[in-house]
Amino acid sequence: MKTHTTIDSPVGVLTLVATGGVLCGLYMTDQRHRPAQESFGVEDPSCFDEATAQLGEYFAGRRTSFDLPLELIGTPFQRTVWRALLDIPYGETVSYGELAAVLGRPSAARAVGLANGKNPVGVIVPCHRVVGSTGDLTGYGGGLARKRQLLDFERGARADHLLFRPDGGPAHRQVRLS
């Protein structure tokens, strides 16, 4: 049985969705690929206490990763991409091409981007940490302004890792994913 609740956050209202008590969705207002509201089931905040607490810690700058059971619903390739997103360190970015190479599919940057865009558990599965090959912000289901907000927030929370491009845009730092 699906249940949902909504919470306020610095990036706007977030809708949390669970199947059988396991988080399977985190959607922003006006998010691309957001399922219809009626598919979220009944409103019941009782099974979202831990997710709400961890999101609060994240937005307060006290949490850099999440420890929640997730039910990632998608194709096998999408789930592979989404699991790889969990390996991108807080405050850092990788390109779609780098992520594709890590997955052993170096020519699949576009497919990685499409899977990234359909991530059903934004913020917690950090698809906002994937950028274009030059470090430019490209595509984000929650909108580029939110992507920039999340990346700036993470970089600000980790001031020792701040990097800047000459044009003032977000820095891109290649990281190795396991």
Image (spheres, rainbow, N blue to C red):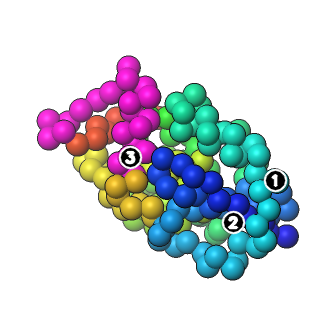
Which stretch did the figure color magenta?
A: 147-168
Query: In the visual, does 75 lie left or right of 91?
Result: right
Q: Residue at x 27, y 50 (%)?
A: 136
Per the model, the C-alpha gap separating discs 2 and 3 is 26 Å
- Counting residues from the start of the chain, the first of labels 2 and 1 encountered is 1
Residue annotated with mark 3: 149
Q: Which residue is mark 2?
A: 73
Point out residue 25 in the picture as x, y percentages from the top left corner.
66, 61
Quarter of the N terminus within the rendering? bottom right
Q: CA distance from mark 2 to mark 1?
A: 19 Å
Image-quadrant location for residue 113: bottom left
Is residue 35 in view?
yes
Task: Please report the residue visible at 69 percent of the width from the left and 66 percent of the height from the top.
Answer: 73
Residue matched to label 1: 47
Q: Secondary structure at mark 1?
A: helix
- Expressed as whole percent of the image width and height from the top left, the position of residue 28 reads 53, 61
- Mark 2 touches mark 3? (CB < 8 Å): no
Q: Name the side, left or right, on which 98 lies relative to 29.
A: left
